[in-house]
Image (cartoon, helix red, strand yellow):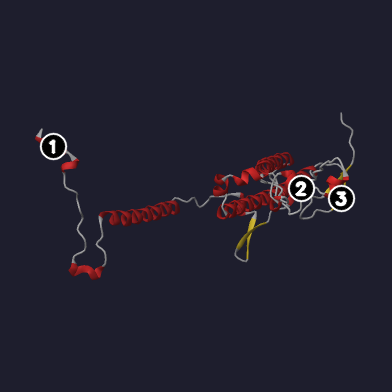
Amino acid sequence: MSSFRKALKSKQRNHHERSQPDARKHLGLLQKKKDYKQRANDYHKKENTLLALRKKALEKNPDEFYFKMINSQLKDGVHMSTKQDGDQVVTEEQKKIMNTQDIAYVEMKRVAEARKIEQLKGSLHLLDVSSKQKNTHTFFVDSKKEVLSFDLAERLNTVPELVDRVYNRPTVATLQDKRILGAVEPQSQMKLSTARRHEYKILAQRVNREKKLFVISQKLQTRKDLQDKRQKIKVKKETAKTAAIYKFQTRRKR
């Protein structure tokens, strides 16, 4: 039992590494084992890298050959390819497959952005995009006298200060409730308006990104269609916001 008690970690003393003696304070901190291990690992890593490079240089085949040696030349210290367009390794079919994959990826990202835009629109409802009220609400009365004495605030059962609000228009009974008045403070209203502006900023950025992805998708599709061997006439040039438009020769389908 005594041996088990001695083996308990709770009964053992904590090991403390000694610090730098006062006589050697001018030499800096005393190196611990973890510092030595870190320095030793870095040294051995560099040593192994040099050994591997030296071995690779010794075992290099002097008769090694690959086609890049004859298809490139040095110009101003930069290797430039001398391969002509007629020597392309990629076939037309492979190009179409690669372009199709690019279009599929861009379309996937565009659809994802469109879904996120719809989610943001559903949560924000686009209530305070503009200061003007676009919707109209018609009230019907029985006589002209009621038209002259019509009070919109009384009809909506709210205070005159909140008549022009498009959203969150509480009634008089709601405003008289002390709990509601205590909960809606100017600071909390300011935080809500700041968060709402941030959400609308994100929405505008996503809409702009979705438009850019749509233009990229159109341009990729146009480049894919241009690989067809049919005769074509350019109707509209390509711009930064629109893809080029071509008119192709009609072909009868089999």
Q: Amino acid at mark 3?
A: Lys
Instruction: Relative to 31, say whether 220 is above or below.
Output: above
Q: CA distance from mark 1 to mark 3?
A: 91 Å
Front-most of 76 and 134?
Answer: 134
Front-most of 202 and 130?
Answer: 130
Front-most of 70 and 99?
Answer: 99
Q: Amino acid at mark 1?
A: Arg
| Residue 5: mark | 1
Q: CA distance from mark 2 to mark 1?
A: 86 Å
Q: Where is mark 2, residue-wise?
A: 152
Count all numbered tags in the image, as a single digit: 3
Q: Where is mark 3, residue-wise?
A: 234
Closer to the N terminus: mark 1 or mark 3?
1
Mark 1 against mark 3, which lies toward the viewer?
1
Closer to the N terminus: mark 2 or mark 3?
2
| Residue located 62% across and 43% down the image | 174
| Residue 240: mark | none
Write down the quadrant of residue 57 in the picture: bottom left
Position of the N terminus by quadrant: top left
Q: Can you give x and y, in whole percent of width and height, for residue 148 in the image?
A: 84, 49
Mark 2 against mark 1, which lies toward the viewer?
2
Mark 2 against mark 3, which lies toward the viewer?
2
Q: CA distance from mark 2 to mark 3?
A: 60 Å
In the picture provided, is 18 more to the left or to the right than 96?
left
| Residue located 44% across and 50% down the image | 59
Question: For the residue carrying disc 2, how many other residues have a C-alpha within 10 Å: few (<14), some (14-19), or many (20+)?
Answer: few
| Marks 1 and 3 close (CB-CB < 8 Å) | no
Question: For the residue carrying disc 1, how many other residues have a C-alpha within 10 Å: few (<14), some (14-19), or many (20+)?
Answer: few
